[in-house]
Amino acid sequence: MRWFGVGLFLAGVLAIGAALAGLPLGITRVGDVLVCLFATGLGLGTFGSHNDTALALLRDNRWHEAIPRALGREIDGEVLFNRLDLSELEAIPKTAWFLTVAAPLVFAWAVSRLVL
């Protein structure tokens, strides 16, 4: 699910570009740009909350045999790379799922403002 947020973020960057391009032509308004910025931020927040949740859960359960090897290698790499930051992560699955629902809705609102 964390890569869903990356897609929303990249689509938001494109929407910001479209809104900014239409601004001098009078096609879009400043409010449209701000809504696109908000949608882009939520997309990035979606990725971040899912990533932090995944890493925190992997950190807490990495010694279990049920974890696939690829995920085990990912958490081992994170431990080697940045042990202190990893120890401070908390799993926030409810926030992650809320952002997963809210971000596409706000993005749809932003695109509708650009298209309509």
Image (cartoon, grey):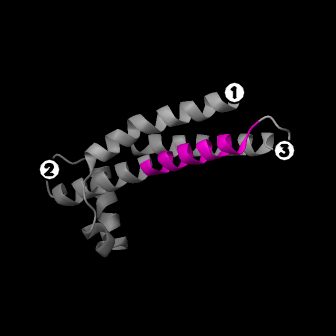
Q: Mark 2 packing: few (<14 Cα in 10 Å), some, or many (20+)?
A: few
Look at label 3 and name its amino acid.
Answer: Pro
Q: Locate residue 36 relative to residue 73 in the image: left or right.
A: right
Read off the residue under disc 1. 115
- The residues colored magenta run 28-45
Q: CA distance from mark 3 to mark 1?
A: 16 Å
Q: Is residue 62 above or below residue 27?
A: below
Q: Locate residue 36 relative to residue 17 in the image: left or right.
A: left
Q: Quadrant of the rendered structure where residue 63 is?
A: bottom left
Q: Main secondary structure of the magenta part?
A: helix
Read off the residue under disc 3. 24
Mark 3 or mark 2, which has the lower sequence index?
3
Magenta-colored stretch includes residue 64: no
Q: Is residue 63 above or below residue 8?
A: below
Read off the residue under disc 2. 65
Q: Locate residue 87 relative to residue 38 in the image: left or right.
A: left
Question: SS at mark 1?
Answer: helix
Residue lying at the far left in this picture: please name it.
Answer: 64
